[in-house]
């Protein structure tokens, strides 16, 4: 069964927002990855390297709230309304491909489905109705 998680975009204040959410929901972050942890960190502006590339906060056994900082230097621009994705986490690589191909048809590809540097099979796009999606298959889960 595919898992569905909310994925939020912030204009550089993801860490502040997630510390707030953690104070409300409790729990521990399941993941915190900074842009400084990425292979391209040395090409980034120094003041952006400590920003959040990915963070996860489990809300319960079924829901993980996730987010990133959108960086204009990386070609991303936060506009109210594009600050969220539906993040699908399928159980197989084949299911990931099927969902990606089906939902992205006639849409706008942001990132082709590929083996990402963090080990997952990942892609993102906006569907033909303007809804933003991420497909993320983790072969180790």
Image: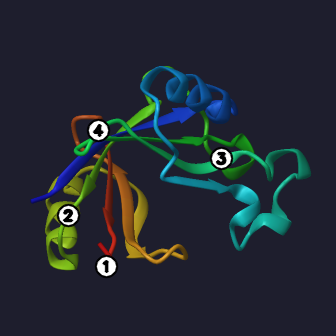
The quarter of the picture where the C terminus appears is bottom left
The residue labelled by disc 4 is 60
Q: Are marks 3 and 2 in contact (CB under 8 Å)?
A: no
The residue labelled by disc 3 is 52
The residue labelled by disc 2 is 90
Q: Closer to us: mark 2 or mark 4?
A: 4
Q: CA distance from mark 1 to mark 4?
A: 22 Å
Label 4 packing within 10 angstroms: few (<14), some (14-19), many (20+):
few
Q: Is residue 91 above or below residue 59?
A: below
Q: Is residue 81 above or below residue 117?
A: above
The residue labelled by disc 1 is 139
Q: Position of residue 98 (x, y in %)?
A: 14, 68
Q: Secondary structure at mark 2?
A: loop
As drawn, is 47 to the left or to the right of 85? right
Q: Closer to us: mark 1 or mark 4?
A: 4
The quarter holding residue 71 reads: top right
Q: Closer to us: mark 4 or mark 3?
A: 4
């Amino acid at each position: 069964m595919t898992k569905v998680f909310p994925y939020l975009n912030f204009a550089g204040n993801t860490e502040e927002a997630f510390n707030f959410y953690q104070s409300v929901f409790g729990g521990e972050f399941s993941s915190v990855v900074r842009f400084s942890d990425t292979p391209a960190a040395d090409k980034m502006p120094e003041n952006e390297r400590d920003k959040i590339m990915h963070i996860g906060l489990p809300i319960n056994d079924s829901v993980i709230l996730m987010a990133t900082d959108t960086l204009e230097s990386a070609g991303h621009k936060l506009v109210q309304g594009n600050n969220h994705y539906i993040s699908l986490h399928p159980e197989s690589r084949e299911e990931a491909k099927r969902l990606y191909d089906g939902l992205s048809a006639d849409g706008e590809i942001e990132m082709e489905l590929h083996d990402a540097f963090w080990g997952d099979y990942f892609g993102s796009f906006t569907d033909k109705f303007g809804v933003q999606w991420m497909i993320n298959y983790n072969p180790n889960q």
